[in-house]
Image: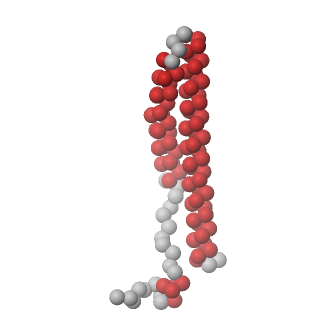
Amino acid sequence: MSSEKRASSKQYALNLTLAAVVSQVGCLTTALIVVALLLGLWLDARLGTKPMFTLILLVGSAPITLALMFWIVRRATAHIQPQPPAISAKEANRGGHDDSP
């Protein structure tokens, strides 16, 4: 397997990992907002306090969502290893040394 193809497959894997993280964060955010909305509407209907619990739970879900997003992204990026830059074919033919001024 050539070094360019290997680098391309590593980039593809990195892109898939990043797409998975973005999907997790998006789904988590949506789920938390929907749960806060439904729970707030239910509590307001039961207690007769029309917008109070809905607003409190929606506003309260924002910092929880941010903290969970931060935790998910930190956990995912901890597994990503930085890759050394790929050597071009021109540099490989010269032994990796740049003789230009």
Q: Position of residue 34 (x, y in %)?
A: 59, 30
- Residue 93 lies, with reference to residue 84, above or below; the image says below
Q: In the image, what residue occupies the spot 50% across and 53% down? A: 77
Q: In the image, what residue occupies the spot 50% across and 79% down? A: 87
Q: Quadrant of the C terminus?
A: bottom left
- Residue 72 lies, with reference to residue 88, above or below; the image says above
Q: Position of residue 24 (x, y in %)?
A: 59, 44
Image color mode: secondary structure
> Is residue 31 left or right of 55 when viewed as pictured?
right
Q: Quadrant of residue 47?
A: top right
Count up the numbered dots: 0
* Residue with the most extreme front position: 50
Q: In the image, what residue occupies the spot 52% across and 81% down? A: 88
Q: Quadrant of the N terminus?
A: bottom right
Q: Position of residue 18 (x, y in %)?
A: 56, 54
Q: Nearer the viewer, residue 12 or 3?
A: 12
- Residue 67 lies, with reference to residue 36, above or below; the image says below
> Is residue 31 left or right of 65 when viewed as pictured?
right
* Residue with the most extreme right position: 1
Q: Position of residue 51 (x, y in %)?
A: 51, 18
Q: In the image, what residue occupies the spot 56% across and 26% down? A: 37
Q: Nearer the viewer, residue 12 or 78?
A: 12
